[in-house]
Amino acid sequence: LQGEFSIIQRETGFISGLVCVLSDITKQEKVEQERRNFVSNVSHELRTPLTSVKSYTEALQEGVWKDEEIAPGFLQVISTETDRMIRMVTDLLHLSRMDQGNMQVEMEYVSMNDLFTHILDRFDMMMQSEAYREKNYKIVRDFTQRTLWVEIDQDKITQVIDNILNNAIKYSPDGGSVTCRLMETHNSVVLSVTDEGMGIPRKDLNHIFERFYRVDKARARSMGGTGLGLAISKEVLALHGGRIWATSVENKGSTFFISLPYESFDDEEEWG
Ligand code: ADP
């Protein structure tokens, strides 16, 4: 604890009071420490792709550009790494806006069944594209029959679901299933995505929602990740009064859950 004393003194010199302010500096220090870590992480995360862009550019300048076999590969690396940096900076801007409480949310009532269906249709389409066809990933839907209306910012929740699904696919083995469920409890709508991937060690499970935390840094980076997707998802859910969490069994797979506040209307039929 840090204490500060002030004396309240009249013009006559009479001391009429004493004010003592005690502040919990352990908490302040923790926030300050987190901020320093964050800045150092951002610098490091940007430095890695920048260094690689720089060295590939230099090689091209030094003559590789003339080599028709090698040059296209080098240009591809530069382009991929630049894309990743752009994604990272965009993600950082989103986070900073949310940190400052400046994030605009546009809440509207949405049928979660329709929204999730729409997103999964898009993923099904993507799985048929050339890049994924050979992988044989299966997306399984297991939805409640009831239509669940929730008040959300549709774009932001779509981003969260996209991110979870992208991760599920990224970490799936060939031929793996990704099972998508939609359920309700008495006061919330719960959506889950289960994969059959490598899973997440128990010690990492609570950390993966932290900024830049990755179980296997090198591997996650090589897959194009920014390490910010789940941190953003957590903030988006907090804006909605909801929650995001995960369970996992190593070498078996992981399940990511999101829950959103929900009031069920028993007389739903009457509303047509
Ligand atoms: P990234 O851009 O690295 O995917 P995320 O914030 O989306 O960042 O995820 C953070 C980390 O959580 C990932 O790097 C990975 O280690 C782990 N992770 C996320 N989803 C899964 C999953 N479905 N299976 C295994 N690990 C996962």
Image (cartoon, helix red, strand yellow):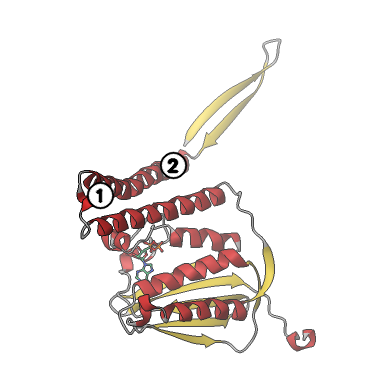
Q: x, y (%) of residue 157? A: 56, 67
Residue at the (35%, 47%) spot, across then down: 46
How much space separates mark 2 and mark 1, taking CA atoms?
45 Å
Residue, disc 2 = 26
Q: Locate the C terminus by quadrant.
A: bottom right
Confirm whether residue 126 shows in the render: yes
Taking the image in four quarters, ligand 1 sits in the one at bottom left
Q: x, y (%) of residue 201? A: 30, 69
Residue, disc 1 = 56
Residue lying furthest right: 270
- Give the secondary structure at mark 2: helix
Badge count = 2
- Give the secondary structure at mark 1: helix
Q: Is residue 117 above or below residue 164?
A: below
Q: x, y (%) of residue 266? A: 72, 85
In front of the other: 124 or 202: 124
In front of the other: 45 or 18: 45
Sequence-first disc among 2 and 1: 2
Q: Is residue 60 above or below residue 245?
A: above
Residue at the (50%, 82%) spot, across then down: 181
Q: x, y (%) of residue 211? A: 41, 54
